[in-house]
Image: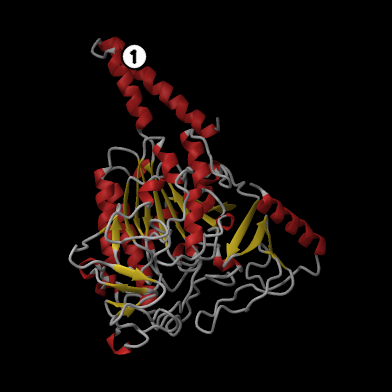
Amino acid sequence: MNTFLRKICRLLVLSILMVAASCNLSGKKTNKEVGEAKNKIIDRRPNILLIYVDDLGYGDVSAYGGTELATPNIDRIAKNGIRFTNGYATSATCTPSRYAILSGEYPWRNQKAHILPGNAPLLFDTSRETFPSMLKKANYTTAVIGKWHLGLGGETLDWNSEIKPGPNEIGFDYSYILASTNDRVPSVYVENDKVVGLSPDDSLEVSYNENFPGEPTGKENPELLKLHPSHGHDMSIHNGISRIGYMKGGKSALFIDENMSDTIMVKTKEFISSNKNNPFFLFYSLHQPHVPRTPHPRFVGSSGMGPRGDAILEADWTIGQILDQLENLGIAENTIVVFSSDNGPVLDDGYQDNAVEKIGNHKPGGPLRGGKYSMFDAGTRVPFLVSWPGTIKASTSDALVCQLDLMGSFASLLGLENSALDSEDTLDVFLGKSHKGRTQLVLEAMGKTFYRQGDWIMIPPYEGPKIINKWVRNETGNLEEYQLFNIKEDIAQQNNLADKYPEKVKELTKAMNEVKNKG
């Protein structure tokens, strides 16, 4: 039993003794009432709110040194908790990182855990325990609201009937999600196992192979667009924006991009209000600043950086609304808030939205090299904040931590068995009681693994382009020789030390392969 749990137990015993003493003195409390009081104390497990943003970089948050964008509400989490300077997603792209959080397993162990099309089947094995299903054993009510992008249904899916398996089959009591991503069809929300607002008289059809006869596309009908693609994203048109994939029908169910942030926020607030009196786990999964970047009109122009900056400020505002609600309901001090991003930043990711032209002096990756899709550090090293007002003291930690370890750490907090293959117990680090985090991580970008151990990052030789493409411009990290960096002394990864320390390269390569061969 760790120190934190021992303290909790001592407090429980003291509280029970005080209740019992008051019963004996007054004669008004029965043994049954004492037992009920004891159960009430034990049942006040902390709520867990995981705030997960999409494509937000290390330098996009003012708490991490960003000077061109102010994110006061994200900064509130930092001021009330721990700001981790070495916090990682498991992958430089979204689907793998999200899979790792919910499964407790490195995504490269699952060959299907890559960026999924909008009609992909559910990525999880429903017979295996997940983060939410584990928490249900501790009587948590669980929900995911927002972006999903982890597949739905089986190999064949009829969007007009029950959509199973999905989030509810892996442990979520409630789900209100984007069917995939905001740039992929179908452009609908799915609540539990049904498309929201779908009319039986206008069935929804989806294809990632060919277009439906007579349906316009961004490639063939650019005159119908209000936001034009820069590369890809030129298939079915909805709301003046062409997407990846083809769809037909379902007109009454199609979302409005500009309202998406508010829709997700309202559903999130409804869930919190409905569950304020019992412990809950809420995966609040924002879509910003993923493309297409379409902030609500009240945020347009707010950043001076175009839609990407505006979308970040919109996300920060909605996060503030959720934090305010926790305080107004009197549950902030009983809620652990975890904030992070699924991967690093990207500017032009498929649409002509002036992200590159209006970047100015802003550095989305901060001092780090690379970005989304990259094996360099900005691809996976992301903002990572943990707060628990009244329990966690405000501080900054250089400990190596990873989103992968949330499942194992919360299992430790709640006295549950950790069945996850790769999720470690770093609870004391998340609570600020230790600065000794992980010793190593096997990270992934576009199916290629690389390795961090201590202050060292080792990237094996890989074939492929050095730059993603002429639009994205992010460096991939591909090189036909080993790369070795001391990330503490060379945070920008400018000095390849592989030739200087060949034995270190061999040591790290062996250690990485040992982890990969586990399980």
Q: Is residue 142 above or below residue 378?
A: above
Q: Would residue 397 be seen by someone viewing this image from the given angle?
A: no
Which residue occupies the foreground of this view, 278 or 518?
A: 518
The quadrant holding residue 428 is: top right
Residue under label 1, please give it: 21
Which residue occupies the foreground of this view, 126 or 158?
A: 158
x 56%, y 59%: residue = 111
Q: Is residue 328 above or below residue 148?
A: above
x 30%, y 84%: residue = 225
Where residue 198 appears, as percent x and y from the top left, is 22, 63
Where residue 99 appears, as percent x and y from the top left, is 48, 55
Q: Is residue 381 left or right of residue 506?
A: left
Image quarter of the N terminus: top right
Please tell me whether mark 1 sits on a helix, a strand or a loop.
helix
Where residue 262 appears, as percent x and y from the top left, is 26, 63
Q: Would residue 439 be seen by someone viewing this image from the given angle?
A: yes
| Residue type, numbered disc 1 | Ala
The quadrant holding residue 278 is: top left
